[in-house]
Amino acid sequence: MNHIKYAVTKDVLASKEIRFANYIIDFIVKYALSFGVGILIGLFSELTGNYTFLDILLDEDTGWIFEYVIGFLIVIVYYTTLETLTGRSLAKYITKTKVVLYDGSKPTINEILIRSLSRIIPFEALSFLGENGKGWHDSISKTYVVSVDKFQAKKETIDGLEEIGRIGE
């Protein structure tokens, strides 16, 4: 029998309000990173005398394309790096949540990359407001955002019950 020991259940999932807080906090972080990239492009241009990137960025006709590309790269690098290494973005640290698979295990880099790439789907940010509170980036990557405290308490309860069962054997 294939039994999942720490299956994610509704009681450990992060609430819609927490998910919205994660979105706002990560939005601010991504905005700050974008601003930092812009400053770096400006500094690079001044230090090297090569204004190619700055000219592309400031061009009224094509600058928006460059901005979107930089924005997409920031989203992919930010989420993929942090969530692969820690299971958490900066917002998830603040709200005490993390990304897990259905069995409670840490997602692989491939699952996190799929999750990150799914975030660039237009209107994806609004998808978690649906009835089940899962965003498309969750559904597509088959990941869950759980409350760390609730999930840890559930694991400890399950482990404790298993230990009691072993004592009676």
Image (cartoon, rainbow, N blue to C red):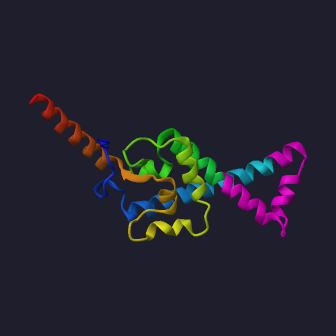
Rendered residue at 62%/61% (across/down): 120
Rendered residue at 42%/47% (across/down): 101
Q: Is residue 10 above or below residue 81?
A: below
In terms of depth relative to the viewer, which is nearer, 62 or 60?
Answer: 62
Q: Position of residue 159 (x, y in %)?
A: 23, 37
Q: Position of residue 164 (x, y in %)?
A: 13, 34
The span picked out in magenta is: 44-73
* Main secondary structure along the magenta-highlighted residues: helix
Q: Is residue 70 found inside the magenta-colored segment of the image?
A: yes
- The C terminus appears in which quarter of the rendering? top left
In the figure, is residue 57 to the left or right of 103? right
- The N terminus appears in which quarter of the rendering? top left
Rendered residue at 71%/61% (across/down): 68
Q: Position of residue 41 (x, y in %)?
A: 78, 50
In terms of depth relative to the viewer, which is nearer, 107 or 67?
Answer: 107
Which residue lies most toward the right here? Answer: 49
In the figure, is residue 163 to the left or right of 58? left
In the figure, is residue 41 to the left or right of 102? right
Q: Is residue 38 found inside the magenta-colored segment of the image?
A: no
Q: Position of residue 69 (x, y in %)?
A: 73, 57
Q: Quadrant of residue 132?
A: bottom left
